[in-house]
Amino acid sequence: MSNAVPETERAWTVGTAPGIFPSIGHSIALFRRPLNFLNSLPARGDLVEIHLGPLRAWMACHPEVAHQVLMDTRTFDKGGPLYNRLRPLMGNGLVTCRQDTHRRQRRLLQPDFRPSRVADHTDMMVREAESTCRDWRAGDQVDVSAATMALTTRVMNHVLFSDSLGAAAAAEVGDCLAVIVRGLFVRTALPVDVLFRVPTPANLRYRRAVGRVHAIVDEVVADRRRGGPDDDRNDVLATLLSAAADGSSGVTEREVHDQLVTLLLTGAESTALCLASALDLLARHPQAERRLHAEVDAVTAGRRRPGRAELARLTYTRSVVAETLRHRPPGWLFTRITTRETTLAGHRLPRGATVLYSPYLLHHDPASFPEPERFLPERWLPGPSAAVPHGAMLPFAAGSRKCLGDTFAVAEATLALASIAGRWRLRHLPGYTERLRPAATLGPRSLVMTCEPRAYAQAGTAPRARSLAPRATAAARAQDSRTAGDNGVDDA
């Protein structure tokens, strides 16, 4: 019996994207102007054929079509160019594993990310957020992208390793991740292996970065093992080592490594980009920023430290996070592979066909989200206006492969945003130009902003200027998120 989700009875349209070049297909368009290319596809149909190099693939451009792909995980399994590139990095971890092993892996890791465990981590999340901005001074120019990455890496270090990852190693993971995400997208857009075997400087940097991440994780695991059986830390590493010691669990030593690499990289990168994007967007939308500040002040009652009790009351702050995930979803493009011949949007697909879906594309569909280019956190406040069409909002995917850490990530971003906003306004540098460059993930990667303490903003005292980052020089302009990234791809 088929596990496929029945399609809605309607007249689906199927088309082909224009501009196919011999051998490279649509790879140049996807590489150079990825968001612009995506946004051109719905006019071609609900399901649109594109070519990634010599590979034929189909993009789900309608939310119901994408929803079918995500809900029928046995027919549309993890695979295709993206996951073919991720597996050498993450191995057979939760993100990349095939459907036949997913349930076991998820059951193993789920307890560490259930709501009660997330609640246990809220104080730690706030401490790390406060430490991020504690040393900022009025007039400082802060590398927000680096600061949020350092913050989320420290949070994942605590959850995975009980802070066993030293400061130097955590910083190196962040540096390696920047190199890795620059390499993954190129390898996805142009899935021709021979190009990436050539020892070019970029390929060598990518290999070294992947190797260092694996080595760092192995060092942490080895150190924990040397601690002996009396080491009773309550973290993900302990969960995995206990399962590996239990011969009936099916967890191998290799899986311990793969799961740690997977959770470290995905947990740090995506939340860091969400938080950096939120700070960037708030600076562009002062009305939303004022409303967020008012909520934080009211909820924390001047204590400046939101905690577990306050998290549920940060309604508007959480709406800012939700709208950021809609407007700029860190995970913006994904692939699946068909395990059998099937029908999608009325079109027959052979076994082994590559299917893509893009949260960014679906989140900017005006039929689902009126005025999709506007940053409107009010979309997510309780009430009738908060209704979202089925399958239209997919920042964490859906179905049985929905992100394990979605609740954790939203709580972390909400508390971090409230902690920073309780102390600071962040302002763009004079002459700043937005140049979002989609890579394997989407978000600002070199965002430098000026600190303006909220006490100073209200009292009018002069700030003490101190520069921590080079000043941007390009002419300022607001950029439409549908064409952001048209200046090229940072990658991954």
Image (tube, rainbow, N blue to C red):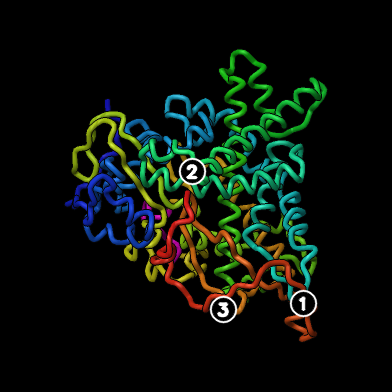
Residue 73 image position (x, y, % from top left): 37, 34
Residue 145 image position (x, y, % from top left): 62, 59
Q: Residue 200 carries which label?
A: 2
Q: Is 118 drawn above or below residue 489 in the view shown?
A: above
Q: Is residue 386 visible?
A: yes
CA distance for labels 3 and 2: 35 Å
Residue 163 image position (x, y, % from top left): 76, 40
Give the foreground label among 1 and 2. 2
> Residue at the location (36% across, 40% down)?
191
The residue wearing badge 3 is: 431
Q: Residue furthest left?
A: 11
> Residue at the location (38% across, 58% down)?
32
Q: Residue 465 carries which label?
A: 1
Magenta stretch, residue numbers: 385-393
Q: What SS does tag 1 mark?
A: loop
Give the foreground label among 3 and 2. 2
Q: Which amino acid does label 3 sit on?
A: Gly
